[in-house]
Amino acid sequence: MKAKLLICLVLLLSGFDTYNFRTIRGMVTDSTAQPLSGVSVTIKGTNTGTSTDANGRYAINVSQTGKYLRFNYVGYKTTEVKISADTVVNVRLQDDDQSLSEIVATGFGKMKRASNVSMAMDMSAQPMMTYSVPAQGNTENYNPVNENGFQIASSTPVTTFSVDVDRAAYSNIRRFLNSGQMPPVDAVRIEEMINYFDYDYPQPTQSAPLSVTTEIADSPWNPGLKLVHIGLQARTISAENLPASNLVFLIDVSGSMSDQNKLPLLKQAFKLLTDQLRAEDKVSIVVYAGAAGVVLPPTSGNNKFKIKEALDNLNAGGSTASGEGINLAYQLAKENFLPKGNNRVILATDGDFNVGVSSEGELQRLIEEKRKGGVYLSIMGFGMGNYKDSHVETLADKGNGNYAYIDNIQEAQKVFVQEFGGTLFTVAKDVKLQIEFNPRHVQAYRLIGYENRSLKNEEFHDDKKDAGDMGSGHTVTALYEIVPTGIESSYLAKTEALKYQKTTPNGDSGELLTLKIRYKKPESENSVLLDFPVKNVSKALASTSENFRFSAAVAEFGLLLRQSEYKGNAQYSEVIKRAKGAFGKDEEGYRSEFVRLVKVTQNLDTRKETASSDADDMRTK
């Protein structure tokens, strides 16, 4: 009996030792003291870990049995720190060129070694979730992007396009780079990269829900050319003044969603959104796989436990009946419609539709029909390997909503917490821009990005033509590269002068262009017109705003990723230099993270070219 009591006492004491946790916190930075987000932090010899947030900070619970903390990140040397009595452990990681050279992409979907990228579910310790880029069988799909070319202002002075607040391309590109791969060219949509970041534009002061900012300076990568920067700022509505929401979570639970970076990450992301809801908000949950069904009827936002419990009970399995799920979600949203509220379906999927309504044409027509009922659509993309960006982008463009790609919990935090109003509450819909260039000062022009947002000039006046929507606090940035009159450029083909056309605009008004904007109030189907003449006044690049310089750096990075024929003298080193000089407040660390990604790409791109050259040498021999 005594022996048994002694054994029980030993076990009890050992249990106290095992569960005697304490929390260690700290920050992880690079060699230049810039914070690193997404760094894997684990207790060596266990699968317990977390990752750093957008500011490079982490927190992890360790027991008395833990000996070392292990810090791991693509492109940096793995660092181990002995656990002591300290509760704050700050770490500076050193660049590791050798590590990067081992994970260079040798072809889309094929790698020498895949690097694990961690996703922290919250700031407390828990089992580490990791994923790798599939070495084979990659079936990701992207719509082709055919870059805008230069247009001659004397013959085609007017250009029209829809705004784009989607930001999915940037986080998707980040996912590729963090796993040691260059992204496929068609995954690079430059306007989404630029608009991933917020810019410091003034709030609207008039009755219009939008303000407009313009700047002109020398093109950083094409000497002799100019860059025109256009910035739109949507009015920010305070959280207490936001209308009530009628939300339907439409969640893909098909078999393709079983990976850790899909449904498990999705659940955590939607829990973050649930935490933002108020008593007047309602949430329903519809799931679809082989069939579709309601797993949570309309539930008040103050019943967060019930909503999260429904999310926790979701499991992946079966094929994907997307059409049936979309119909059911819109039906539920319509039944609970709030005439003066925010009615929205939030679709979360990897886009791998394979049962029922699945062709892009059918899906497009279905969504176009559903949006007429006043229900908006937001799409959250998840996953890798079989990700169907082309399907998801089509739905987002046609559904009066927006599109984000969630690659980690920090991105979910950005979309559902920090940008809650912009993601879910529209202040101006069907926003279109039309620009008329003055041929006296502009020989040719080119819109950077927005290829899939181009409109016919006559569609600017057509209120039935769908365009992009802007949410509370959203910013939209567009860049035009122009060839000034009298400047020779290799981008312009030789053409014969036109005999009957005259380029004699109203004297010399000194205007470079006129910017016109059409938008609709959320409850209206009639557009409002805004008109802004822009003078031909150019600044030195160094004198431009941080908005101009940072957006130009992101655009230049996009040109390099695409290996664009218009990249001119673009260089990674110049992107890094310009971005570093335009960080602004950068409270969440997104701009500093951008610089880190450019550094990773600079190394990957160089190694890729070297590897290709070596392969060519081998074939020659």
Image (cartoon, grey):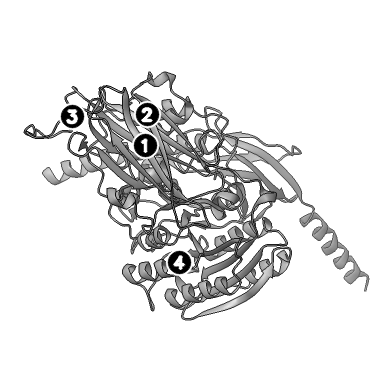
Q: CA distance from mark 3 to mark 2?
A: 18 Å
Q: Are marks 1 and 2 in contact (CB under 8 Å)?
A: yes
In the displayed structure image, the side of residue 325 where residue 308 appears, left or right: right
Relative to 532, does residue 519 appear above or below in the rendering? below
Q: Which mark is residue 503?
A: 3
- The structure residue drawn at horizontal position 80% and vertical position 53%, both measured from the top left corner, is 20
Q: Earlier in the sequence, mark 1 or mark 4?
A: 4
Using residue 476 as the reference point, say whether residue 59 is left or right of it: right
Q: Amino acid at mark 2?
A: Val
Q: CA distance from mark 1 to mark 2?
A: 7 Å
Q: Which mark is residue 515?
A: 1
Secondary structure beneath dot 2 equals strand
Determine if residue 67 is in view.
Answer: no
Q: Which residue is mark 4?
A: 372
Q: Position of residue 257 (x, y in %)?
A: 48, 68
Looking at the image, which residue is at 43% across and 28% down?
549
Which mark sits nearer the N-terminus, 1 or 2? 1
Viewer-side residue, 387 vs 260: 387
Q: CA distance from mark 1 to mark 4?
A: 29 Å
Q: Nearer the viewer, mark 3 or mark 2?
A: 3
Q: Residues within 10 Å of mark 2 (few under 14, many from 20)?
A: some
Q: Residues within 10 Å of mark 4 (few under 14, many from 20)?
A: few
Please rate how many residues cluster around mark 3, counting C-alpha atoms within 10 Å: few if below 14, some from 14 to 19, many from 20: few
The amino acid type, in three-letter code, at marker 1 is: Leu
| Dot in front, 4 or 3 | 3
Tag 2 residue: 534
What's under tag 3, amino acid-wise? Thr
Judged from this view, the residue extending furthest toward the front is: 506
In the rendered image, residue 166, in percent from the top left (x then y), is placed at: 44, 50
Placement of 307 over or under 46, stated as above or below: below
